[in-house]
Image: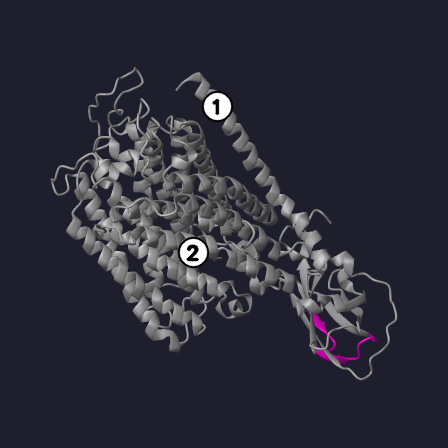
Amino acid sequence: MSDELRQKNTKLVKKLVIVALLMFGFGYALVPIYDVLCSITGQNAKLEESVETEQSFVVDENRVVNVEFITSVNESTPLDFHVETRSMKVHPGQYYTVNFYAKNNLPQQIKVQAIPSITPGLAEEFFKKVQCFCFELQTFEANEEKSMPVRFVVNPMLPERYKTITLSYTFFDRTNNTEN
Amino acid sequence: MSAVVAEHDDHHDHHDHGPEKGFLRWIITTNHKDIGTMYLVFALIMFFVGGTMALIIRSELFEPGLQFVDPQFFNSMTTMHALVMVFGAVMPAFVGLANWMIPMMIGAPDMALPRMNNMSFWMLVAGVLLLASTLFMEGGAPAAGWTLYPPLVLQTGKAFPFAIFSVHLLGISSIMGAINVIATIFNMRAPGMTLMKMPLFVWTWLITAFLLIAIMPVFAGAVTMLLTDRFFDTSFFDAAGGGDPVLYQHIFWFFGHPEVYVMILPTFGVASTIIPVFARKPLFGYASMVYATGAIAFLSFIVWAHHMFTVGLPVAGELYFMYATMLIAIPTGVKVFNWTATMWKGSMTFETPMLFSIAFVVLFTMGGFTGLMMSVAPSDFQYHDTYFIVAHFHYTLVPASIFILMAAGYYWLPKWTGHMYNEKIGQLHFWLSAISVNILFFPQHFLGLAGMPRRIPDYAIQFADWNMVSSIGAFIYGFSQLLFVYIVIDTIRGGTGEKVTDEVWEDAAKHGLEWTVPSPAPYHTFTTPPAVIPTEHF
């Protein structure tokens, strides 16, 4: 192989390796790009974005929306977790409070994070929470039991086709995670 | 393959020598033909390993209920079958063909980067062995599907980091192979071999290589995120830390959709090489074939979310991905019409490579049509994760990629070995394969439309009959492939004993430079560039 060809090959290989490395970076760049696209399209509202101050709506007395609550814990999170009612009928525009209860089953302190999920996903932007235990990491002392109110409102702008909204919380054990 | 050192009367310089003696030849070789042979043999072995896993799956599904394996192992089988077939069989087989044929087709003495070529082969072997070793680990092999979706895949036992590292190795191996192909095609073409004179197999591989360089690093990134999520407290896909498992699906399919075209584009290339020879006509619409390949490759990057219609996309997203996906049917249609037009009024003969190629055109088109059905977002909710999708992608892989790999084997074996294969057994292999592959996969359409989910070891009794038919087809198909092994070994040992000419097939030299060198192809070819470039296209 001539030196000239060797040089040409080396140059091309360098360029292609750079492309490969850039694409590796692009994979990671998709993470923030995804967050931006989600916030533009109103999908997958993340924790901090759910916090809002109480604003008042005109209450739609004629309309009833069924709101269901689901509680669950991830894998071996040592919590008993339940809610005072499985479902409730609400008028859009009116504020309601519902109590969730959780008890630490361990004789030591644990830290847990609740992650909300709303179904149907497209109704998510019309479901506002002004108070929620999911806004921050929760610390439970040994065997501590807590009552945790959630205050929410359904925006009267909610399209007619949505009759039922399901709010689900999952508790994840974050005790051993260093970042907290 | 036996040593294929033929004396050849081109001038010899001091680099030009035969292969090393003994076993070490295969370890240290930098010869593109040796490496190509190793890739092809390795791929064939993996084809049977993956096939055995498929037969375990089909045995379990022969009847409803749990018969032979426990569900965890069943899930490992579906996962490993896919990983082995994709990364161990189909992709290496095409890299093997690229190694053997690209230098010979463009009139180059070897690949541009022979040492890297050796390294990428052995890295592939290491990657696949590492993957196979997970079968014997505590907690079993990965069982979350080849897509490795979190959070399920994070529950894999001890095998998890090994599976991730094997994906890294396979990725690095593919990227090195792709870089080599691009460097060879860009820098090593014989004088006069302009880009638009290259055989389509070379063109499709050039585009495939660019796809590989663009997507394998993204996949490596995605699995690295899985690794750090599990072991280093990151939260890319962990909801508890503000991550989102759906993000993984987006990253995966950004890789995954071009990846399926990595397996089909070289298939198109081989089909475009074989059909003109046996139709005794130039390929219809050479330029449009090149542009269609480019268009398919470009579109593959902007349609990934059609794998995720049911994940809860915004309606605008569903519509965009639906229409973008439908667009792919246009360049693909161009190709199918071109192959048909190539055969139109041709003086066709039906040797085994041509039979496999014609079956490819027909059956791949069927796989394409079911793909088009699933591109319709609202109806995809019915097909999603059912046996319909299983039928779809197996039609685009087995009677397409695998059939064409078989066709390529029959087509080039005489050139590689200098012997003619047994045409009768070849045709028997074809007919058994073509019939049984339909018995195997066609009923899966019915099962899917009736709602049978994929990746399950047991099913409701209304699915029993078609599952039984499908399993019977699977066993006929699987065992028929042993005929191919017999033919390959028999051909290497002398085949029919018939002396093959340099051209092998009638007028093949008009279609490609590889038919102008002696049969068997000498250890070194085109140490001086060819004087004449074939102009009747390809």
Say if labels 2 and 1 share a chain: no
- Residue named by callout 1: A8
Q: Does residue B363 show up magenta in the picture?
A: no
Q: Position of residue B369 (x, y in %)?
A: 42, 62
User: In what quadrant of the picture does the N terminus of chain B appear?
Assistant: top left
- Residue named by callout 2: B333
Q: Quadrant of residue A89?
A: bottom right
Q: Residues within 10 Å of mark 2 (few under 14, many from 20)?
A: some
Q: Say which element carries label 1.
A: helix
Q: Position of residue B212 (x, y in %)?
A: 48, 42
Residue at (80% x, 74% y) in the render: A156
Q: Does A31 sit above or below residue B524?
A: below
User: In what quadrant of the picture does the C terminus of chain B appear?
Assistant: top left
The one of B402 and B335 positioned closer to us in this rendering:
B335
Which chain does the residue under circle 2 lie in?
B
Q: Does residue A84 show up magenta in the picture?
A: yes
Q: Residues within 10 Å of mark 1 (few under 14, many from 20)?
A: some
